[in-house]
Structure formats: C-alpha cells, structure tokens
Amino acid sequence: MRPSGRAFNELRAVSFDVGVAKHAEGSCLVKFGDTHVLCTASWDETTPPWLRGAGRGWVTAEYGMLPRSTGDRMRREAKNGQSGRTQEIQRLIGRSLRAVVDLKALGERQILIDCDVIQADGGTRTASITGAWIAMNEAFKWAVSQGVIKSSPVIDRVAAISCGLIGGAPALDLDYDEDSTAQADANFVITGTGGLVEVQATAEGDPFTDEQFQALLALAKAGCADLSARQAELA
Amino acid sequence: MRPSGRAFNELRAVSFDVGVAKHAEGSCLVKFGDTHVLCTASWDETTPPWLRGAGRGWVTAEYGMLPRSTGDRMRREAKNGQSGRTQEIQRLIGRSLRAVVDLKALGERQILIDCDVIQADGGTRTASITGAWIAMNEAFKWAVSQGVIKSSPVIDRVAAISCGLIGGAPALDLDYDEDSTAQADANFVITGTGGLVEVQATAEGDPFTDEQFQALLALAKAGCADLSARQAELA
Amino acid sequence: MRPSGRAFNELRAVSFDVGVAKHAEGSCLVKFGDTHVLCTASWDETTPPWLRGAGRGWVTAEYGMLPRSTGDRMRREAKNGQSGRTQEIQRLIGRSLRAVVDLKALGERQILIDCDVIQADGGTRTASITGAWIAMNEAFKWAVSQGVIKSSPVIDRVAAISCGLIGGAPALDLDYDEDSTAQADANFVITGTGGLVEVQATAEGDPFTDEQFQALLALAKAGCADLSARQAELA
Amino acid sequence: MRPSGRAFNELRAVSFDVGVAKHAEGSCLVKFGDTHVLCTASWDETTPPWLRGAGRGWVTAEYGMLPRSTGDRMRREAKNGQSGRTQEIQRLIGRSLRAVVDLKALGERQILIDCDVIQADGGTRTASITGAWIAMNEAFKWAVSQGVIKSSPVIDRVAAISCGLIGGAPALDLDYDEDSTAQADANFVITGTGGLVEVQATAEGDPFTDEQFQALLALAKAGCADLSARQAELA
Amino acid sequence: MRPSGRAFNELRAVSFDVGVAKHAEGSCLVKFGDTHVLCTASWDETTPPWLRGAGRGWVTAEYGMLPRSTGDRMRREAKNGQSGRTQEIQRLIGRSLRAVVDLKALGERQILIDCDVIQADGGTRTASITGAWIAMNEAFKWAVSQGVIKSSPVIDRVAAISCGLIGGAPALDLDYDEDSTAQADANFVITGTGGLVEVQATAEGDPFTDEQFQALLALAKAGCADLSARQAELA
Amino acid sequence: MRPSGRAFNELRAVSFDVGVAKHAEGSCLVKFGDTHVLCTASWDETTPPWLRGAGRGWVTAEYGMLPRSTGDRMRREAKNGQSGRTQEIQRLIGRSLRAVVDLKALGERQILIDCDVIQADGGTRTASITGAWIAMNEAFKWAVSQGVIKSSPVIDRVAAISCGLIGGAPALDLDYDEDSTAQADANFVITGTGGLVEVQATAEGDPFTDEQFQALLALAKAGCADLSARQAELA
C-alpha cells in the first residue's frame, strides 16, 4: 500500500479545463490531483533572433510557481531570479513540445508557452508538459480557424508522468509526500505513438538497479498512454 | 453611456471565492468582472530584521501578474526583475492592510500577502487590496481557531476601487478598455467605517479640475461602501 | 504651533538658482529650506525605442539622493539598485512635467530630467518637480535661442507641495521632523492655472477623514499658487 | 563507421593526471580525447547554512567552461551569469558524487568540487563526473593522512559516459561533431558496482524507440565499467 | 602654450568649502577649476565584517558622478551598476586615505567617505582625494570635540594631482580638453611630508620615455606640495 | 635574503607553452614559477558597436581565476559577478596590448584575449600581459598565414613585471608570500624597445620614498628586458 492509498500503477484524478484564459490563443488548466497548473499558449509572429531567416519556427516555454502554491511559502522568483530547477524545467517543457511539432511547417513564428503552478502537490513538470500540449494544440486550432496557417503543424501528442521507488516498489505519478520519501525519482516524456522524448531517472540516496529502472519505465509507458488517450478526446 | 454599457456608478460583477488555496492559512480568489486575482495570506512567526524586538508585528504584500494574464503577453518578471509599477502596487497593498490591523496586538509575527493576477482587465490593484483583506482575515480566523492568537487584531475592513474620467464624465470601476482612454485615473482605499487610507489621482494628458476630482471621490466612497458590505458578509 | 515654528499654511524659504550646471541645457538648484535638489535638463534628439516614428516627443526623469544627503547615511543605489521609492518618485516627476508640455509640438525629441538630492530635509519629491519645471523651461529657452525649435512647447507651469496632519491639524510643506510624526502624508501637483495633475494622500497609522483631506487640498492649492508665481518670475 | 573513426562501443583515449593543482586538497586533470577538465576538491570544515546541526556533511559542485575552450568563443559567465545549462550540469555532478559518499560518516563538513573545462570536444559533463570522483577521493585520502578523519566516507566509485544515436546506430562517448548530428543524446551515471545513479536521454528531433534506448543503456554500462576500472587503479 | 592658457606647471583655481553638508560629520566641496566634488565623511561605530575583533579601524570610500556632471549625459549608475572605472577610483581614494591614518589608534570604527562629482572637467579622482582628506579630517575634529576619541588618528596630510604629456610636453592638472588629447595620463598621490602613496602613469597611444615620466613626477611633487599647504591652512 | 631564496633582481623560472589551446587562433600557457595563466587570442571579424565605421580595430581582454587556483578557494565570479580587482586587471591587459598594435593597420576587426589563471602564486597580472602578447602575436601569425591580413599590425613587444619593497629592500617578481608582506607593490608594463606603457606603484601601509620608487623602476626595466628577449625568441 502506498501512502496515498492508490494502486502502484494508478494515476491521480486528472482533468483538463480548456480555454480558461480569456486573452490567450490557447489555454488549459490541468489538474493531476492537487497539482494545478495553468498553461497558456501565446502566438508570436516573430522568431528568436538566432533563428531569423532560418525558414522554420520555434516553441519555447517558461515555468513558474506562485509563492504560496506550496506548503511552505517559496521566495518569489521575480525578486530573486529564476532558480536552476526552474530553468531546467522550462527547458524540458520546450524541448518536449518541439519534438512533436513540424517546425518547418510552422514557418517563421513561435509559440510561447507559460506554465504557472497555481497549486503544487508533486509532479508539476509532468502536469505542465501534458497540459501545455493541449494549450499549444488549441493555439494551432485557433490559428487554422483564423486562416493564419492552413493546417496544424502538430505531428503527434506528447504527455509526461513521474514515477518513483517507494519502499523499493515502483509507483506511478507520485504526490509530494510520496516524492519526499522516494528512493528514486524519474520523469518520462512519451508521445502518443509511444516514442520516447525524454527519460530522466535520479537516485535519491542509494543507486537503483536496472530491474527497478525497467519497472519504472513500464509504469510510465502505461501512464502516458492513458494521458495521451485523454488528450486525444480534447484534440 | 460608457463603453462597458454599465451605469457610471456601477461596479462590475464582484465575487469572492474563499479558501481556494489548499496550503495557505488564508486565501481568496477575487473577481472584479474579468479581472481575477488569487490572494493568499501566509502566517510567519518571525518579523523582518529591522523590526526584531520592537514588540509589534507586520503585514507585507507581494504582487505579480501571470505573463499571459493580459491581452499582449508581458515579459515574466522572474526573468527581468520587478518593474517600478509592480513595486508601487505591492507597497500600496501592504500599507492599506496595515492601516486596519493593530500591529501591537498581532505581536512579533507577520502576515505575507501574495496577490497574483490570473487574468487582467483593469483594476488589478483595487481588486488585490479588496481580496487581500479577506485572505488576511481568513488567516486571522485560522490563527484564532488554532489558538495561535487569542483574538483577531483586525480593527476594520478595507476595500479599494478605481475611478476615472471618461469623455469628461466620472465613472466607477474602469475596465481595461475604459482605463486606456480615460483622461484621469484614480484609486481610492477606504475603510469599512469610511476612513480614507489612500487617495491617488493622476491626470493622463490634460489636468483635471477640483470639481471633477470631488465627483470621483464621491463615486469611490459609494463603491467602497458596497464592497465593504460584501466583505462583511464573509468576515 | 508646529515643530518648525512656522504657521500651518507657511512654506519654507524657497529659492531657485538657475543655470548652475555648466554642461546642461537647463538647470536649477532648488531649495525648500534645508532640502536642496539639483535639477538638470538634457536635450536628446532621439526618443525612446517604443516611441520611434510616433510623431511626438517625450519628457522623462531620474531621481537620486546622495548617500549622505540624509541624517543617517543611505546605501548608495549604484551599488544596490534603485529602490521602489526612487522609481515611484522618478515616474511621478516625469508624469507631472509631461502634463504641461505639448509633446506633438516638441517633435521626436526628448528631455531627460535629473533630480539629485544634495541635502534632504523632507519634501524632496515636491522640490524636485518644482525645480525640474524650471530646468526644463530653461532647456526649451535654450533650444529656441539656438534655433533648434521655433517656439517652446510648454503649455503651463507646474509645481508641487507636500501637506500633512500634525497632531490632527493640517500643515503645509512638512520638513523631515514634521513628516516623521505626521498622521497623514500628502503630495499635490498643480499647474499654474490651477489644474490638478496628481493627488496623493496616504494614512500613516490611522485613516483620515474627508474633512481633513479637504483641508490638506486647500492648503496645497494656496502653496502651489505661491510657488507657481515664483516660477513665473523666472520663466 | 562513425565520424570519429572509432568503433561504436569504443571510448576515446582517457587519461587522469592526479594532483596537478598545487593548492587543492584533491585534484585531477581528466581527458576524454580532446575534452580536458580540471577537477579540484576543496575541503571545508563547515556545511551550508540549511544543514547546520544536521549531523551530516555535504558534497557540492560548480562547473564552468573557459571562454575559448570551444570552437567559437563563448561569453564569459562571470560577466553574464551562469546559464541554465551550467546550473543543470553542476547540480548533476554534485548529486552523482553524493550518491557514493556516506554523508553521516563525513560529519559536518563539505567538499566543494570545481570542474573547469579547459578544452571542450563533447562529453564535458561525463568527463567532469568521472574526474571529480578522483579529485574527491584524493581529498579524502589527504584528510585521512592528515588525521582530519579516521577513514574515508566513500562507499563506491562513480563514473559517467554519454551515448547517442548516429544515423540511427547507438554509439558510445560522442565527441562534439558526433554530438551535433546525433538524433538522441544520453548521459548515464553508474557506480563501480553497477548501480544506476542517473539516466538521462533526450530526443533531438524525432523521438527514439525503447529498443534504441536499451541499446544506449547497454553501451553505457560497458563504458562506465571500463572507466570505473581505471578509477580503481588510481584509488 | 597649453590649451587652457595656463603655464605648464600651473594648477587650476583651487578652493575648499568646508562644512557644506548639514548632516555629515565632516564635509568639503572641493573645486579644481570647473571640477566640483562634494566630499562627505560619515562616522560609523562599526567595522566591516572581515575586520571584526581585529583591534583596528577602517577608512573606505565610494565615488559617483551625477549623470549630467559631464558634457554628454552619462547613464545613471543606480540603473546600470558601477563601472569598472568607478570601482577603480573609489578603491584608490580609500587606499590613499588609509595611508595617512593610524588605524589602530582609530579603534574598531570606520569612516565612510562619499565623493560625488557635481560637475566634471577632468581630474575628478585627484580632486576627490584632496577634498576627501579635508572631509575626513573634519570628522576626526568633530569626534575629538564630541569626546568620541581623545585625539585624531591622522598621521599626515595627503593630496593628489594629475599630469600628462601635451604635444610631448609635461603639464600639471589637466582639464577635460587637455586630458582628451594627452599622450600620457598620470595620477600621483603624495603625503604632506613628501611620501609617495600612489604612482600611476598610462600611455594613451604611444609609450612614453623614462625622461618624460620623471618630468611628470617632478611636476606632481610641486603640485601636491602646493595643495598640501592649502590643506594645512584648513586643518 | 628574500623569503623565496632568490636574488633581489632575479625572476622566477619563466616558461611559455605556445599553441596549447586546440580551438584558439593563438594561445600560450605562461608560467612565472607556480603562477600559471592560460592566454588565448580569439579572432573576431567585427568591432565593438561604439567603433563601427571608425576604420580601425580593437584589442580587448578578459581575466579570470579558477576558484581553486588560490590557497583558499575563491568564490566563483560566474555566481557573484566580476570584482573590481578583476575589472581593473582586464582593462590593464587590454590597454597594454593596444599600445603595441597599429589599430588602423588591423582594420575593422578585434582580438579578444582571455587570460585565465589556472594556478596563482603572485604576479598573475604581469604573467597575463606577458603571455597575452605571445597569444596575440600567434593569432596575427595565423591570420597572415591564412591570408586574412597581409602583414602583422604588431609594432613592438610588451612585457610586464611586478616589484616590491621587502623589509625596505627592492625586489623583483614577487611571489604570493613575498607580496603579502611587501611594504609597496608595483607593476610595470614596458615595451621591447624600452617604452613605458604603464607604471603603477602603491604603498601598502607606509608611503615610500622617491629613491625607493626609482630602485623599483630600475629592477623592472631589467626584468622586462629579459622577458622581452624571451618573447623575441618565440615571435
């Protein structure tokens, strides 16, 4: 039995509220249990300076947490600058989305994704990626409907989930309490067709074995397939 | 007729969702029409260094806007630092709340208020102050219920509203479109018993007359009385 | 009787030394009692990037205090960055001056105002605005004399004064000691023809009443009229 | 045939120069082909503030690249701040080393690792981890010889290697040219006894399959075993 | 004939206004021709952290230029941070003053010198040092008169002057126009008894000969002796 | 007898390893005893923005120390920003090299010098200048060989050495221990033909006499002549 009472291969309650942000071209409030992330997609008819004239577009992301999204209040990054953790996560989100977009078909434009954690309970980066794909997809639907682009440059869906070893046992979609005591912490980003985009596993304390790692990977494949199916319903 | 179709002395639809943030000691999602601000109050058993040993407490506030809370995406302050406008607003929120708290009765503790604009449509600072009072009051109720303090140090309620001159005519609670074309822009912070905490009026373009200013003040008094009555229902 | 021994409606000794800065296109050393501010106006044949091609000019201001202009030495902002208070004041100075300049008539140029407090004894922002108008006006006179512009784009004069409640009584032009104990602190920016440009009143501690506020406003009108008359002599 | 002419499972020429830094308690100049990293270990009889009194020690790392260690000169981070990539790498190095040290046995002290890239040709993070272990181990040997600690708190060795898909084929220890064209980029951190400390694999462009990922993992296990054997000779 | 019309060994008109700053323990407005620097000395009953418990005091200095002290307006360092030049000058001022103070006799206290350039016309660092000595000496006189210390810890006077090669000819105390065209630029800091505290000479363009350098040194000795005599009159 | 056992006019063992950096257009690892500095020269076909269109080139330098190049570990400047000392040194290196390059003959290009201290034992700035000249000269030789420029714009060689007073006696090329106890600290930059580029002498504690200063200058002339001869062998 894991601390949350869930089965070891069970996701938390997942929901997607699409179109919640009045101003954004695409938006989604994603919830993985008590982890709530507002994802918006902003359409930008320019590309970053280093990509000018390259004949292709870009997708980039920024990530933040509200100071009291967490149990103990965090220092506001607007006053202290972005932490290494924040930068690592936002680079991961951007990379994950770019893996499923045909950047040449997009043309010289970019999509700016903002993932802001309204409430945190573990798994904020995986919820962000999963919700960001929906926000991005909404923005592409908007652009097609407006005649800005003829067809969506999206190639595939992409979702992400965390796994970890709790008392040596592999478990899916850890909440904050579970994550705090896990021996290993892993995040997987997997496409709708099962392609691997990102595999990250880190020992917290003792190293883990190959067998343990393979079990985490198997859990993640099933979890991402489940999330991807829900994305498909909204796409 | 004003652009929003409202009467010149009419507030937008106002709502307060209390207790929306799982982790915070007090919280309120305040809506003034399409302006939505999440206000949280964090209890802190220490005071700022410059107040150590002074025998009284403190209330301070931080303010931020999500990058895509606005029509055009703003630059993220975590990457660029807080603007002068942000600093001005967060100082105003803290000052407004301190005016209605008995800091000696609070003792050597502080309340940290976070006002984060989820969606913006004008009046974010006045919605923030009005909602922050509720979040703060919730935190005091929590502390009394927990036995941390014997009774609440709150002396009065405090609310805030904006006014402006639209085509020369005084109007209450401007939305973004109205604010963009207003000749004068004013913000008033008024207590439940009618005391003035803050009066700010700024000419945008031509100066305004004393008569115009007095009309704005009269509108604000009525508007804050209305907001204060709604706060009282939740207190 | 107020601490300074002045009548409640009495300004401190005011003086303006025009042309004190050898290099600047316009300059004025303004003294409100022991508050001394050096104001310079620099002519710039460009406008800020966001105003390029807009067919109009700009007036902007920066403000600073020498570290030992005050009773206790302040930290040097060049080492620590500008405080929120500094940014708030310099935005106020710029806004006040722009209210009395025809920016279209100025053309695509800007005036950069620097207000540097050489010695501080309360009222530095109001002395700055009052002196900055003179420095700016000198720069326009210089530009006309040089044939850079045909006529001055100045529409009106503008002056500023502080007021406050001392022991409940309204008083004009507070010095530092008076300001430190005042119950309310107000600043007014008023044009030569009596138009209101900025009204700011803040409770320090207890809120103030409408009657008290109206008394402060009346004092400020008389004070600014006096300052404006002195500006007219130098214009 | 891969671009470098090496076999797909072949490491570059690897060397370790131990004790090259006169002042450091431990040091190692590690070379993976043309990638040269100077690793030093500094002994510190204090722990970070957040660990004071916790009864255990810490190992942390910083990473940097000389501006002209690369083909095109990089901007100096001392002038521009650390990039997200730099922060990500130095956190990885510290985490990898802590996985093989008994922090309680170390006591309230810390080891500060510096990995500075003198010359870069791909794989700087894996060379850094591998060399840093040697520098750290030297520092522990020094401390034992000086009587500072009775026995070394090192539990295991740790080494790291990169892998990638070149033209779809898995290859070990990519140099810069190979890395620039690889479809997937992976880094593995593995202990002397075969425990996994960190698994990271990222698609560059198209996602990769599970089969491809497993091939990369197999290559890395062999590569790290080889590096670990060389570390053992020097331990 | 040099551009300024002065003899090659002639100082500009020099004046010292002592006690100009109401709040400071010591102050001096020093003028070297059109270069005007306000120097203040602030008494501080603490020492820097790294000197706590060392049984001796410290003298340190900060330097700044008002943005429009110069012909072209400079960027304000409060917005942009201190330049390398500013840091170099303020370190030189502090070092020069410490050379003539018995820091043990001062005890665990420090003097904070602020040199702010009100108007610049070359030689701001040498005017700063020369005026700062007077401000510091005033602060010591104040401290003795207040009974804070029994006797002044000043050992000697110190003054500074610039020299340069104009058309190959050595000249004393260069103004801005002269400095801009000089082939070599030198600054000398010399005590009242003729001791050398700092010698700095820099080629601008072509190197200079030993003979030229010796001529600059001779000019500086005479110039500093003259300045030192004037300091003595005010001491 | 001086602490190092060397004669008072004796340099430390000096060596130059030319071409050590694979990627740089010119490079030199210079050693003055245990002081080791890696100097690289990077060719840049652009000039700084303020020099565009001026018809001449530029030489600039950056300087850094590895954190554990010193006896006690220094804080990494990438995390803390460049110190005033670092900025002072890198400006000195750039100025020294520009004195011996015909910038018009170079054309609109710049050479970026990086001097990174691998190990420090006193005299890092003088070793940097001396080694940087060689790295720069190598880059010019490379550019001539590649046909980028027809002939080298180098006019002269330039070398630098430190001197100081040890127990009142003038000594050449101080190491760290000697420098720590020296009464005066001087650095001289002298060309191959004996021209003076930079003279800097600073009292540490008591001022020094003219006689002492002249003795330091004489030592430096001989020392730089020796270094210059060694540079000539490699040119």
Image: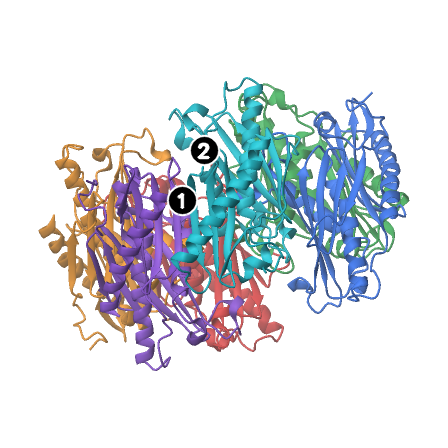
Chain colours: A red, B green, C blue, D orange, E cyan, F purple
Q: Identify the chain of the residue marked 1, using the numbered disc in the image.
A: A
Give the percent coordinates (x, y) of residue D154. 17, 41
The quadrant of the image that shows the N terminus of chain B is: bottom right
Disc 1 marks which residue? A175
User: Crowdedness of circle 1 by 10 Å Cα count: few (<14), some, many (20+)?
Assistant: many
Give the percent coordinates (x, y) of residue C79. 52, 43
Residue drawn at x 54%, y 43% is: E63
Give the percent coordinates (x, y) of residue F147. 34, 82
Q: Is residue C163 visible?
A: yes
Q: Nearer the viewer, residue C175 or F165?
A: F165
User: Crowdedness of circle 2 by 10 Å Cα count: few (<14), some, many (20+)?
Assistant: many
Secondary structure category for the residue under label 2:
loop
Residue drawn at x 28%, y 62% is: D186
- Please name the amino acid that badge 1 sits on: Asp
Q: Is residue D160 rendered to the left or right of residue A179?
A: left
Q: Is residue D61 visible?
A: no
Disc 2 marks which residue? E100
Residue drawn at x 33%, y 53% is: F125
User: Residue C14 shows which numbered tag?
Assistant: none
- Please name the amino acid that badge 2 sits on: Val
In front of the other: label 2 or label 1? 2
- Asked if marks 2 and 1 touch (Cβ < 8 Å), the reply is no
Name the quadrant containing residue B186.
top right
Q: Nearer the viewer, residue F37 or D155?
A: F37
Name the quadrant containing residue C214.
top right
Q: Are marks 2 and 1 on the same chain?
A: no
Give the percent coordinates (x, y) of residue F126. 32, 54
Q: Is residue F84 rendered to the left or right of residue B44?
A: left
Q: Label 2, label 1: how many angstroms apart (C-alpha)?
A: 65 Å
Q: Nearer the viewer, residue E227 or E23?
A: E227
